[in-house]
Image (tube, rainbow, N blue to C red):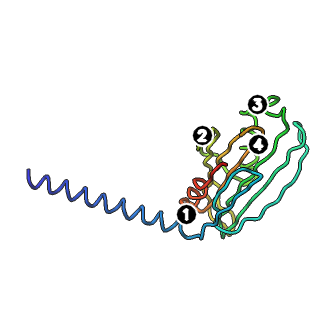
Amino acid sequence: MHTLLKGQLSWLLISLSVITCANAVEQEQATLFTWQDFKSDGGHFSIQFPSAPKTQTNHQDSVIGQVTNHIIVSHTDNSNFGVDYSDLPGFALEFVGKDTIYSHATGALLKKTLGMLRSSIDLNFQGQTGKHLIYDIPPVPDKPALYGEAYMFLIDKRLYVIDATAPADTSTQVHHFLNSLRFD
């Protein structure tokens, strides 16, 4: 019995050591960047980017009226981090519905990134409900396969798409970015 207990204790210590090492690697990968705080007063959110983000605003006519897009992006090597929030016309949500808006936003994101959807689940984050997407981007010449995640929220008349792609072995950076999001 004493030998069996020693064996179980040894396995427990080895397992804890492996878990601790894996956690240290994840923490190291998340700190490969010097994360910078970014606050959007107009967008009513803050988030951390791995490098100074660039911003742009554009207006597009659509079947639901004019849509104003605010795009904030940061690129590092093979990784991309972005927030795109769109001010929708007042009747858009009533006209097409939440599910249709999320569906169109998902399709646009996958088309833009050439991604293949792995999953789309409901999300509750900081009291906001939305969608959590996980997708893969196949490799292209001179670029590795990428792992992508996005959060989507419809808050009042505004659609937020918070998106990050990175090589699969650096997915902790994607999680750091998404989890640094704070709504005002």
Of tags 1 and 3, which is closer to the observer? Answer: 3
Q: Earlier in the sequence, mark 1 or mark 3?
A: 3
Tag 3: amino acid: Gly
The circle drawn on residue 170 is 1
Q: How busy is the neighbourhood of tag 1: few (under 14 within 10 Å), some, or many (20 plus)? A: some
Tag 2: amino acid: Gly
The image quadrant of residue 120 is top right
Q: Earlier in the sequence, mark 1 or mark 2?
A: 2
The circle drawn on residue 158 is 4
Q: How busy is the neighbourhood of tag 3: few (under 14 within 10 Å), some, or many (20 plus)? A: few
C-alpha gap between disc 2 and disc 4: 16 Å
Residue drawn at (65%, 57%) of the image: 47
Of tags 1 and 4, which is closer to the observer? Answer: 4
C-alpha gap between disc 1 and disc 3: 36 Å
Of tags 1 and 2, which is closer to the observer? Answer: 2
Residues at circles 2 and 4 in contact by the CB criterion of under 8 Å? no
Element marked by disc 2 = loop
Residue drawn at (34%, 61%) of the image: 18
Front-lying residue, 95 or 141: 95
The residue that disc 2 covers is 127
The residue that disc 3 covers is 97
Tag 1: amino acid: Thr
Please provide percent x and percent y for residue 25.
45, 66
Front-lying residue, 30 or 137: 30
Front-lying residue, 173 or 127: 127
Q: Earlier in the sequence, mark 4 or mark 3?
A: 3
Of tags 4 and 3, which is closer to the observer? Answer: 4
Picture layout, residue 97 above or below residue 126: above
Residue drawn at (89%, 47%) of the image: 60
